Image (cartoon, rainbow, N blue to C red):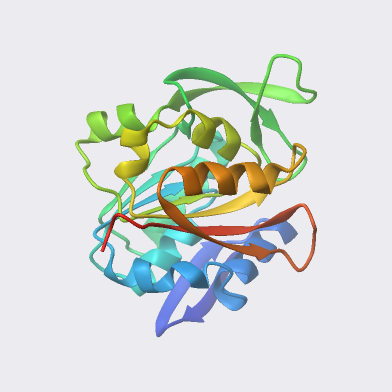
Amino acid sequence: MLRQLNFEGHKITFEERDEVDRSVAAEIFKFREYRAAETTVKTAKLIVDVGAHVGLFTLYCRALNPTAKIVALEPEPNNFLRLTSSLALNSVIGVLTEPVALASKTGYARLIISDDSHNHHLGHDNAPGEGLAVKTVSLSSLKKQKKIGQIDLIKMDIEGGEYDILENWTAVDFAGINHIILEYHDIKKNGRQILEKILRENGFGVQVFPSKFSRRLGFIWAHNKRIK
């Protein structure tokens, strides 16, 4: 069913399929779990939404910033359909949508389909679960293909895929990003600390916001200290 909510003087309309969609909307618009990034969102010229799901973070960014260019990536076909529908329902322009997953390499990978729409993740050949072949793109390839330059903010909510990306980014990749906000998932030992270390070694200041609901989840807010 269609649901409408008010946020910062804007009416946001989206299709609420289930409890998962309701929960994601509450996280973003009610509890403002991305509030660490709000000042950056308001002044950003280019935002990349990685793991866009049904487009709620993109709608959140558009409500806070009516002019920023937004690139929204979502590989799962049903979610991608809802993403484009969400933008149309809200008459949002200036958003480039791509049915791909950000990864360390451009090509194809297996997307493990979860029981709900929010926890799909890229898997290895031995990962359990039903898989769907999806396109992947590296950050450098994405920037080249779409002719985009310095990224003011990149958001990631990709259910553990953040490790593959951050562990394989080059110094050039990191230098091309001003701010990162990501939901971390402790799928490996000391996972959060691994991500923090990578970010700090590449010139980012890091703040960690553990989840109130799970010790294995939380948000990392990272600022490129080379950017004044």
Relative placement, left or right, of 68 versus 89 is left
Q: What x and y, as percent, mark residue 21? A: 65, 59
Q: Residue at x 22, y 41 (%)?
A: 148
Q: What x and y, as percent, mark residue 109? A: 56, 20
Q: Nearer the viewer, residue 127 or 196?
A: 196
Quadrant location of the C terminus in the rendered image: bottom left
Q: How many marks?
A: 0
Q: Residue furthest front?
A: 201
Q: Nearer the viewer, residue 127 or 135?
A: 127
Relative placement, left or right, of 48 versus 12 is left
Residue 124 quadrant:
top right
Q: What x and y, as percent, mark residue 117? A: 67, 45
Q: Is residue 117 visible?
A: no
Q: Residue at x 24, y 47 (%)?
A: 150
Q: Residue at x 51, y 37 (%)?
A: 166
Residue 38 vertical position relative to residue 203 in the rendered view, above or below? below
Residue 164 quadrant:
top right
Q: Is residue 225 visible?
A: yes
Relative placement, left or right, of 56 versus 24 is left
Q: What x and y, as percent, mark residue 118? A: 66, 47
Quadrant location of the N terminus in the rendered image: bottom right
Relative placement, left or right, of 145 versus 208 is left
Q: Residue furthest bottom?
A: 9
